[in-house]
Amino acid sequence: MILSLLILNKAGGLVYHRDFSNTFTKLSSNDYLVLAGTFHGVHAITARLSPFGPSSGGTPSSGLEVMESEHFRMQCFQTLTGTKFLLFTEPQQPNVDVILRRIYELYADYVMKNPFYQIEMPIRCEAFDRHLMAYIKPKQ
Amino acid sequence: MERSNTDSFRHSQYLPFSPTTSSHPSTPLAQKHASLPIPTPTTASSLSGSASTLRYSQSRKTIYDRHLNRSKGAELSKASFAFLFGEMVQYAQKRVSGIQDLEKKLNAHGYSVGQRLLELLVWREGRSGKRETRVLGILQFITNTLWRAIYNKPADALEKSRDHEDEYMISDNDPMVNTYISVPKEMNQLNCAAFQAGIIEAVLDSCMFPARVTAHSVPNETWPGKTVFLIKFEQVVLDREAEFIS
Amino acid sequence: MTIYSFYIFDRHCECIYIKQWHERERAGAAIRPTTSASTTSPIPDKRVSAGGKQITETDISMRNGRLSVQDDAKLIFGVVFSLRNMVRKLSTPDDNFISYRTNNYKLHYYETPTNLKFVMITDVKTNNLRVVLHQIYVNLYVEYVIARNLYVLMLNNYIAVEHSGGEGVACELFELGLESFVVRTLKLIELTT
């Protein structure tokens, strides 16, 4: 079961937030903004904490990808452009990678190709919402 | 003759500029020229800088020398069109103030497209094409031939208005130009299918059926993007039609 | 299935114990073998107490331009603290963050009811080490560190002893116990996975 989705822009600001179930307590929108900013910083630090230096170890260190807690699991997908997709799911949810890829595809289609969307601004695209709900709802 | 993408890259005399844009099937003419050593079409080669990033024809043939049937049935990437159309909308938005003007601007863009498209479509009909003189005839041409040429499917419905003699409506459940566009709430009277309306208007005007065409959104449950193109013919057309009947 | 390092933070947000089994590559630093006599493992490792009074090899890796061990510990604490608060805020207040993974390493976290935080950094393939951390707490920390300090406490007439600056944590028994426990669990986990 998918709990919620957050999208952060390059600078760490929250551009989209959607809850798909009532498991999480409802926080104010300011709380979510603060959370997003905190996570952006934490992500940057985790990339530097790698036991391997930046030059060795093959691929450069990436920053937090999956975080687990007792009641939920959070997966963070960072695109090549710096946009982060945070997906909160139940711990046993399978195929989160596939879901994140599909969400990224929906973002690239209905947000990026929308001439009325300003880059890095909050997302207010009705088509994106519609397709996202249509994709996520059957999985609940 | 249809050839696969990789064949056309290997045998065409063009330097590849990006493997992701759709390539038209190469004509039989292109096969006769000697093929140059072409690097395999990967994104790396287009960024390497060793080849120019624009497609130059080695034999100085331009787009005007191509056969007109060459692009018949060719497909264009929807993403490419979506980005171009998005930029067109943004460009128009900067130069106007107000939704009506924006729709007029988009209509004007579609108008130029429609004028040229009509010539091409009529030419492609060849001997079997004939000049439409009746209103129903030209409307059938639009809903079938024109729609199929652009979208590969006919329009969804053609209706005559009951209240007004001079009004007809063409419906499209999901206009392809609007697929990726979400109009913000403040502008919800805007329908970017005004571009398509411009194409229709140009076709009608050029066939001597002067009219005004506008696009209106009529969302319903199954088709939230449903659009109706309202065609309002001028008096001349109605008079001529009346003569035909009598 | 390798363990890279292990940290303990107390409830005053200080790092009271660091143990590294893997020399973090700093800019141009060579791996120097430890000269400490108390450990006999062939792997070059660093045993540093955060306090400064019991540091045996102060001159290794502290001055290499990139992050020093101290800074690492502070960053880790910051990350862990922020993530824990985020988890508590989003979900129920008694929820606990367990671990996170990047493409190079995985960090496991365990917090005791006394707000003592155990952090372990391992490679990506390790499964949940929460149980292991709990065992370290129960079997090693409580027994060797707290029990020893309770004795000291008794001597000092029960004035509360805190591990300010990490003194009292890096005692011999705890070190040896930790080393052997980790080696043993590593073998166990390798056999079972």
Image: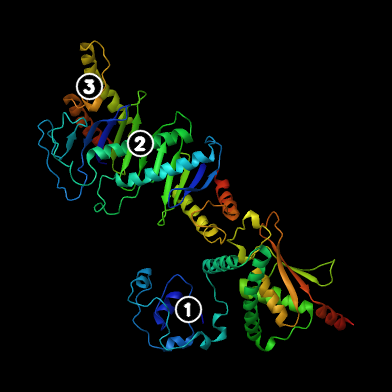
Mark 2 residue crowding within 10 angstroms, few (<14) / some (14–19) / many (20+): many
Q: Residue at x 21, y 15 (%)?
A: C152
Q: Nearer the viewer, residue B104 or C7?
A: B104
Eye-nearest disc, 2 or 3: 2
Q: How far apart in space, not on screen, are marks 2 and 1 (Cα)? A: 58 Å
Q: Residue at x 37, y 84 (%)?
A: B35
Dot 3 falls on a residue whose secondary structure is helix
Q: Quadrant of residue C18?
A: top left
Task: Tell me if A32 is positioned left or right of B189 in this view.
Answer: left
Q: Nearer the viewer, residue C136 or B180?
A: B180
Instruction: For residue B193, say whether it is visible.
Output: no
Q: Position of residue B153 (x, y in %)?
A: 64, 70
Q: Amino acid at mark 2?
A: Val
Q: Are marks 2 and 1 in contact (CB under 8 Å)?
A: no
Task: Tell me if C16 is positioned left or right of B173 in this view.
Answer: left
On the image, numbered disc 3 is attached to which residue? C144
Mark 1 residue crowding within 10 angstroms, few (<14) / some (14–19) / many (20+): few
Q: Residue at x 46, y 76 (%)?
A: B4
Tag of residue C80:
2
Q: Position of residue B206 (x, y in %)?
A: 70, 82
On the image, numbered disc 1 is attached to which residue? B3
First in sequence, mark 2 or 3: give its number.
2
Task: Tell me if C142 is positioned left or right of B46 in this view.
Answer: left
Q: Residue furthest top?
A: C157
